[in-house]
Amino acid sequence: MLMPTGVIKLIDFGCARRLSCLNHTASSSVDLLKSVHGTPYWMAPEVINDTGYGRKSDIWSVGCTVFEMATGKPPLAHMDKMAAFLTSDQRLRPSADELLTHPFIPKNETGVNPWEKPKKNCCGHPAGHCA
């Protein structure tokens, strides 16, 4: 945070959790945390995928912060779907079907998106055109 006096302060808005009880490798599932707090740009993949995280996730977040400080853009900005969602030209926005295919949308164990409804092909029309 940049203070009005020009001093830069590192803050976490009270979301940090003490990890002293964890070992440095945090390899077993018992040693991994499960709660999610923070900004998606700086979240490690294991945090987003809800597979548990430890100190290595903090290293990822620090790396993302340093990258953005050095370049002025968040890491993987070229892959930013949020910019596409918020474009003012509605013709350039992705459809709901396109959003459901995003890698961050979880799939069940069979690889199917649980939010996606199966399309009917009841009368020979292409999928999705039957009433």
Image (cartoon, helix red, strand yellow):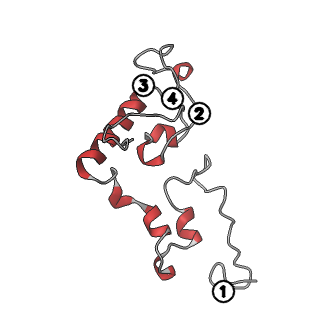
Residues at circles 2 and 3 in contact by the CB criterion of under 8 Å: no
Mark 1: which amino acid? His
Look at 47% across and 62% down and name the residue there: 82
Q: Is residue 51 left or right of residue 67?
A: right
Mark 3: which amino acid? Arg
Locate the C terminus by quadrant. Answer: bottom right
Task: Give the residue number, with chain letter if any, for mark 1.
Answer: 125
User: Closer to the N terminus: mark 1 or mark 2?
Assistant: 2
Number of other residues with Cα within 10 Å of mark 3, as a class: few under 14, some 14 to 19, many 20 or more: some
Task: Give the residue number, with chain letter if any, for mark 2.
Answer: 35
Q: Rounded to the nearest whole Å, what is the CA distance between mark 1 and mark 4? A: 54 Å
Q: Position of residue 53 (x, y in %)?
A: 49, 30
Q: Is residue 16 above or below residue 92?
A: above
Residues at circles 4 and 2 in contact by the CB criterion of under 8 Å: no
User: Closer to the N terminus: mark 2 or mark 3?
Assistant: 2
Mark 2: which amino acid? Ser
Task: Give the residue number, with chain letter if any, for mark 3.
Answer: 55
SS type, badge 4: loop
Mark 4: which amino acid? Ala
Q: Rounded to the nearest whole Å, what is the CA distance between mark 1 and mark 2? A: 46 Å
User: Closer to the N terminus: mark 1 or mark 3?
Assistant: 3
Q: Is residue 87 left or right of residue 5?
A: right
Marks 1, 4: nearer the viewer: 4
Tag of residue 16: 4
Farthest residue in the left direction?
70
Instruction: Examine the image and state in which quarter residue 59 appears.
Output: top left
Q: Rounded to the nearest whole Å, what is the CA distance between mark 3 and mark 4? A: 12 Å
